[in-house]
């Protein structure tokens, strides 16, 4: 008996290879073996697709929402923040939405981003049906913001930083007051939005 061990994705997989177990000169049995009495025949056919748990669904939706937000934010900023209210603001909620709205207002009038923020989701800190907290590595190394006078107005660190991102399942909010809207559209009610984004001071990735 030979035991073959394989390491795949951090999991130890053991497989048994049976060989040379019959005695020399002894004929091997042929034909179809009869299953033991009382055994249950195994069903054959397509394997059912596993159903994701509520937690897994929440994580998948939150990660997709964050990546979509980062892409939309980069695209708007690179185009002098054109269309920010239509493409980025609806992806935000709560105080974070208000903070980004105020930032957007200060960027009007000739500011334009060059380069793009690159992000990588590293881990899930917590998750339930209504809120997911992601640990993200954000890299702004090639980002700059050019002001109306043609000089740099960027105040970032140009580094890889660890960021805690909170994504919440919530209704849309009014961009001026932050008050949640009573939207009866089912698609709107199922949106996940960015509720907070906190850079972990001094922690790189």
Image: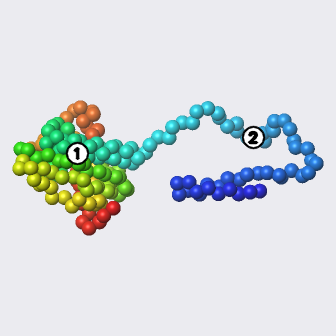
Left or right of residue 170, residue 52 in this image: right
Q: Which badge, 1 or 2, comes first in the chain's sequence?
A: 2
Q: Is residue 38 left or right of residue 59?
A: right
Q: Position of residue 52 (x, y in %)?
A: 44, 43
Sort mark 2 into few (<14), some (14-19) or many (20+) by Cα contacts within 10 Å.
few
Name the residue: 37% across, 56% down: 123
Q: Quadrant of residue 200?
A: bottom left
Q: Is residue 164 visible?
A: no
Residue 79 appears in the picture as rendered: yes
Q: Which of the pair 161/167 is nearer the observer? A: 161
Identify the residue shown where x is 24% and y is 53%.
142
Q: Is residue 180 left or right of residue 17?
A: left
Name of the residue lying farthest toward the right: 25
Label disc, if present, on residue 52 of the rendered structure:
none
Q: Image quarter for residue 125?
A: bottom left
Judge the density around disc 1: few (<14), some (14-19), many (≥20) Cα neighbours within 10 Å: some
Q: Which residue is mark 1?
A: 74
Residue that extends furthest to the bottom in the rendered view of this protein: 202
Please identify the quadrant where the N terminus is shown: bottom right
How far across and how far down the image is residue 50, in percent? Answer: 50, 41
| Quadrant of the image containing the C terminus | bottom left
Q: Is residue 135 above or below residue 115?
A: below
The residue labelled by disc 2 is 38
């Amino acid at each position: 008996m030979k035991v073959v061990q394989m390491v795949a994705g951090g999991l130890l997989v053991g497989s048994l290879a049976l060989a040379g177990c019959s005695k020399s000169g002894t004929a091997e049995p042929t034909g179809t073996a009869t299953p033991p009495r009382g055994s249950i025949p195994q069903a054959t056919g397509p394997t059912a697709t596993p159903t994701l748990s509520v937690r897994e669904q929440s994580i998948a939706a939150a990660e997709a929402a964050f990546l979509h937000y980062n892409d939309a934010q980069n695209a708007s900023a690179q185009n002098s923040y054109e269309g920010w209210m239509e493409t980025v603001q609806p992806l935000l909620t709560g105080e974070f939405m208000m903070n980004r709205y105020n930032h957007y207002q200060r960027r009007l009038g000739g500011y334009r981003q060059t380069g793009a923020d690159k992000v990588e989701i590293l881990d899930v800190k917590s998750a339930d049906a209504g809120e997911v907290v992601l640990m993200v590595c954000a890299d702004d190394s090639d980002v700059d913001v050019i002001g109306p006078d043609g000089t740099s107005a960027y105040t970032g660190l140009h580094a890889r930083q660890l960021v805690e991102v909170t994504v919440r399942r919530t209704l849309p909010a009014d961009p001026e007051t932050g008050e949640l809207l009573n939207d009866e559209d089912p698609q709107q009610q199922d949106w996940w939005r960015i509720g907070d984004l906190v850079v972990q001071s001094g922690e790189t990735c």
